[in-house]
Image (cartoon, rainbow, N blue to C red):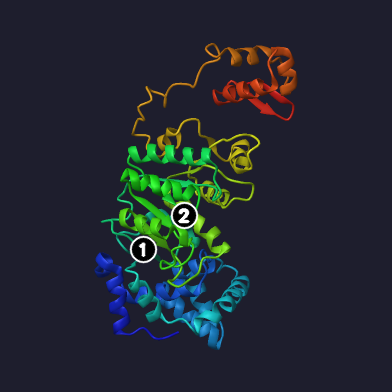
Amino acid sequence: MTPVGTELLDAVVRLLGRSGGAVDPAQAAARVAWSAVVEPGDSVAGELLSGLGPERALGAVLLAADDGFDTLLGRCVEAEVAGAEDPAALLHGLKAAVERWTPRLSTIDVGDVLAAAGAVGAGLLVPESDEWPSAMDDLGPHAPVVLWTRSAAAQLGGGAPALGVVGSRANTVAGADAAAEITSTAADAGCTIVSGGAYGIDAVAHRVAIAAGTPTVAVLAGGIDQLYPAGNAQLLHNVARQGALLAESAPGTRPTRWRFLARNRLIAALADVTVVVEAGARSGALNTAHHAAQLGRPVFAVPGAFASSASVGCHRLIAQGRAQIVVHPADPVAAARPDVTDGRAGAADAPLLSGREDPEVLRVLDALGRRALPESEIARRSGMSVADVTDALALAQLQGLVVVGNGGWARA
């Protein structure tokens, strides 16, 4: 790795912008080097940076790669880095980490990284920056080392609640309509829209936010200079003008499947609430929902046709209790902005419809006995079709009137 001189420190300060005066440029330069060495979410790097500081950690790692691990291990034990209570196990983890970092340690040039960022007008954020999104800190050792940003906005996010809108790249027309309605409702409520800039649901969310004049953030899976997919390059330029592009990998880093999955944790962290509009059985949007749930953020999913492969993932999230069902486009928004009413005549507080008001729900409730019953038996007892029974049970479940178990449905 090339040494960091005065010119490079000046370049770091320029990229830091308004935050440059409050940040130690040497520490920021070390973070830039780390961002080019490690893959996103590397927890060993995160623990080292937290315990030793970026510059001291980098120096110790460089020594370890050349002369052995005594200095690195000693500093970790002294600083009580996570795992230091078992030095043997910590050493094993450190050796594995340095082994995977070594191929890049000897080739990284901080000046090239800074020049590549400057060439596209990118800025640099570090945890000490005033504009650093504090929500990223919830990721702990998996938090990004730095954030590269392209934004014409005065301040990233502006303090507004953020709604993450994610879903299938191969969306259906119904999925696009749902994403547009949810995003439009969120824009009206003053939410920032966060997504991944991909084809499909992501693109719909960004486009609607731009049309509505609300800030939107696209989190990239590669470097800040890699506008991917190429077909969305103009859309991403528009996102940068009205909101921000964010990336954690160093400029020049190509998007890969692994980095797309790692990127999803940043979307989940930035968003106060995440809504999955459409998701196949193996959709990356489910990964975003998983991260959001781990962070304790509310997750919503939009139901679709039961036979639609584009909605399998959403249905599983709902069925497994990992996401709340979106009954109205304002539901996710109400979770993100409980202080803002949606104008639906008190719909946020009123039940959907009571059993006494819905005759099919009433018939289903009357058909239920002391023990749980399958839908086919409820249909026989109520004189309704199985499809109508399924719909009525879903409505009754939303109202808390029935519960489902291994034996079927029963009154709550």
Name the kind of residue labelled 2 in the image.
Gly
Name the kind of residue labelled 1 in the image.
Thr
Residue 300 visible in the shown view? no
Of residues 85 and 93, the one drawn nearer to the viewer in this rendering: 93
Residue at image position (59%, 71%) is: 90
Q: Is residue 186 left or right of residue 16?
A: right
Q: Mark 2 — residue? A: 196
Q: Is residue 147 above or below residue 410?
A: below
Q: Position of residue 139 (x, y in %)?
A: 48, 56
Q: Position of residue 318 (x, y in %)?
A: 59, 37
Q: Quadrant of residue 233?
A: bottom left
Disc number for residue 149:
1
Disc number for residue 163:
none
Q: Is residue 52 above or below residue 209?
A: below
Q: Quadrant of residue 16?
A: bottom left
Of residues 304 and 25, the one drawn nearer to the viewer in this rendering: 304
Residue at image position (49%, 67%) is: 47
Of residues 103 and 85, the one drawn nearer to the viewer in this rendering: 103
In the rendered view of the protein, which quadrant contains the C terminus? top right
In the rendered view of the protein, which quadrant contains the N terminus? bottom left
Q: Position of residue 75 (x, y in %)?
A: 48, 76
Secondary element at tag 2: loop
Residue 404 visible in the shown view? yes
